[in-house]
Structures are given as C-alpha cells and as structure tokens.
Amino acid sequence: MIEHPFSFGISPSLTLFDTQDRKIQRKLSDLRGHFTDRAALEELVRVGDPIAYEVLDVPRPERAGELISGLSILHPGVVGAEYFMTKGHFHSVRGTAEIYYCLSGAGMLLMENEQGEWKSEILTPGRVVYVAPGWAHRSINTNSDQRLVTFFVYPANAGHDYGAIEGRGFRKLVLRKNDRPEVVDNPHWRASAPEQR
Ligand code: S6P
Ligand code: ZN
C-alpha cells in the first residue's frame, strides 16, 4: 500500500488509469429484493442478467483519516417502471459523509435519514452532491441510453450498511412516467419493514 502522495487519472472514456483499481460489478440478479416489480426483474435475469452497475475504486486502508475514491458507472435501463439504480446504503459509521461529482449522463441521488426525512438531488455533468452524515444514498440512472458516471469520495472507515435498505427499501421510488422521472412514495416501505428484517 502506497503511504505517499499519489495521483491517478480519469480517461475521456471514464475509466481510471495510473492506479490499481478494484472493480465491482453488480448484475440485476444481485439486486433481487431492491426493485418493486419482481416479475420484471426475473424476466430480465432470465434473458441475460445484464450488469446494472460497476464501481471502480482506489483501495486504501479502512481507517479514519484515509479516503476512498473512484467511479460509479450505472448503466441505462428499467425494471418495470423503475430505472436501474444502485442497492443504496447507509455508512456503518453514521457520522461519515460522502461527495458525488457527476461526470456524465443524467440521474438522481436519492437520500433519506433515520429521522424520516428524504431528499433527492439531480446528477448532471458538473453537479456535486454532498451526502451529509447519516443519510442513506442510492444513485439512479434516469437517462434511457447513456451511462451515469459519478466520481465519489468518502472516508475509508465509513463501512457499508446495506441491511436497513434491504429490509425495507427507500421511502421513495423513482419511476419512468412518459419517459420522465417521477419520485413517488414506495407503497411497500412500511409494510415490508417488520417481516423482512
Ligand atoms: C460508497 C459509495 C459508492 C457506492 C456505489 C455503489 O460509499 O457510496 O462507491 O458504493 O455507488 O452503490 P452501492 O449502494 O451498491 O454500494
Ligand atoms: Zn456511500
């Protein structure tokens, strides 16, 4: 592990260079339980199980003071009426924030906290979203044919808590209606909480 300052690049085709990045791919089958239309998800899995998103990050020791940064690449598509999206998570260390900087495409960052508030922010090239400590976050690609690419930076000791979101989903869904994104209530949000946790 490098213990000196270093630099790396982001190429015009939006990959990392001059670094040994770690790559994570999530297929639709990895996102079971996250989309409302389960039948639509299973059909997409059956006909090819496409990659929904990829994360390229620059590993660092997971200790306070270090930062992890990289690219989140969300492919275009829908599952039923819901746009392709990330799983979404709280940071295990709730007091840790994150920055998202949009490089390409169009989408939204959907956020909510444990006090019942929610917020959505638009992601278009040049926009920066500050995810405050304690806010779960999920990115959503609302463009029908382009990738949504964001650069993120977060404290290396943050950790990822997926359980709360897997258990009950986000309060809001982002649906495609007349080819435009619409934020609606998640009808299953409260009902699903006790039985799935
Ligand atoms: C990590 C940061 C991103 C996400 C990535 C995938 O704190 O927020 O790197 O990991 O966008 O999302 P998810 O919800 O599957 O981790
Ligand atoms: Zn995060």
Image (cartoon, rainbow, N blue to C red):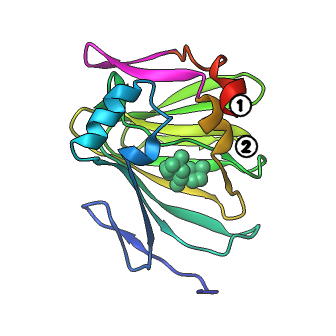
Which residue is denoted by mark 2 in the rendering? 133
Residue at position x 67%, y 18% in the image: 190
Q: Amino acid at mark 2?
A: Pro
Choose between 190 and 60: the one closer to the eye: 190
Q: Are marks 1 and 2 in contact (CB under 8 Å)?
A: no
Secondary structure category for the residue under label 1: strand
**Position of the N terminus by quadrant:** bottom right
Secondary structure category for the residue under label 2: loop
- Residue 142 appears in view: no
Give the side of residue 100 with respect to residue 43, left or right.
right
Q: Amino acid at mark 1?
A: Asn
Q: Position of residue 150 (x, y in %)?
A: 42, 50
Which residue is denoted by mark 1 in the rendering? 113
Look at the picture and state if 10 lies above or below 101.
below
Q: Position of residue 108 (x, y in %)?
A: 45, 32
Q: Residues within 10 Å of mark 1 (few under 14, many from 20)?
A: some
Does the magenta-highlighted stretch encompass residue 95?
no
